[in-house]
Image (spheres, rainbow, N blue to C red):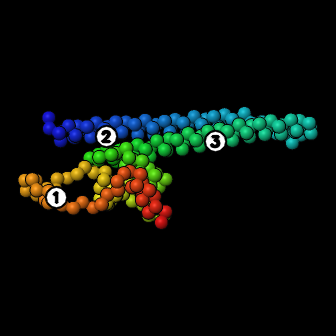
Amino acid sequence: MTEEEIRALLAEAQAQILDTVNRTVSGAIARTQNETDKKFAEFMASVPKPSETEPPDAAAESSLELKSLQQKLADLEAARESDLASAQSTQRDNAILSELGSRKLVAPTSLKRLLESQYGNQLEQENGKWFVRDGDQAQPFSAVVDSFLASDDGKIFTPPSSQVVGNGSKAGNVKNQPEQPKDFAALLERSLQNKRG
């Protein structure tokens, strides 16, 4: 097998794994939401409805019980929000990994962290596709990644291409590369400064 065939097989296997993970996460989100909705419905059914003819002592007792039930409700809602946020974060991570998995990259983990920091809160899913929303505008996430990898900052994440002319024996034959940051921290800092400014 050639290196290209092996890469193709690995890319196909990675795509299948990510698809399976995405389906599993989506199912987990749906199950979590259904379970939370059932618990909420059960809770609401168990809340006693105060009658208008209760004596004052019973109303005070009911008030304490009502406060207790309201606290339980708030706790359930907080747990539900936390579960949904965690599931959405996992889906975003999987979307980034899926997009990067189909490309030849030098440091995919570092690039994933950079993309998460720059676009993580702007990633939205619609009809199974991921978009980067910036105000009223939205771009497909794959186009944003393509654009970034084509930039000077993004080129450090792509493998070098052979730019030697002739037999490669002369040092002067290598074309000039754009200046690249010395490390990932410098790239991340410059990216964050560009985003703020």
Find the residue positioned furthest to the left. Answer: 167
Q: Position of residue 108 (x, y in %)?
A: 34, 45
Q: Position of residue 13 (x, y in %)?
A: 28, 36
Residue contact between numbered discs 2 and 3, judged by CB atoms under 8 Å: no
Dot 2 amino acid type: Ala
Q: Position of residue 178 (x, y in %)?
A: 27, 61
C-alpha gap between disc 3 and disc 1:
59 Å
Q: Residues within 10 Å of mark 2 (few under 14, many from 20)?
A: some
Dot 3: element: helix
C-alpha gap between disc 2 and disc 3:
34 Å
Dot 3 amino acid type: Ala
Q: Nearer the viewer, mark 1 or mark 2?
A: 1
**Which of 95 and 188 lies nearest the eye of the viewer?**
188
C-alpha gap between disc 1 and disc 2:
36 Å
Dot 1: element: loop
Dot 1 amino acid type: Val
Residue 96, above or below 176: above
Q: Earlier in the sequence, mark 1 or mark 2?
A: 2
Residue at (16% x, 53% y) in the render: 162
**Which of 194 and 125 lies nearest the eye of the viewer?**
194
Q: Earlier in the sequence, mark 3 or mark 1?
A: 3
Residue at (46% x, 41% y) in the render: 90
Q: Which residue is mark 1?
A: 174
Q: Earlier in the sequence, mark 2 or mark 3?
A: 2
Q: Nearer the viewer, mark 3 or mark 1?
A: 1
Residue contact between numbered discs 1 and 2, judged by CB atoms under 8 Å: no
Q: Position of residue 48 (x, y in %)?
A: 77, 36
Q: Which residue is mark 3?
A: 78
Q: Which residue is mark 2?
A: 15
Residue at (23% x, 37% y) in the render: 9
Residue 48, above or below 178: above
Number of numbered labels in the structure image: 3
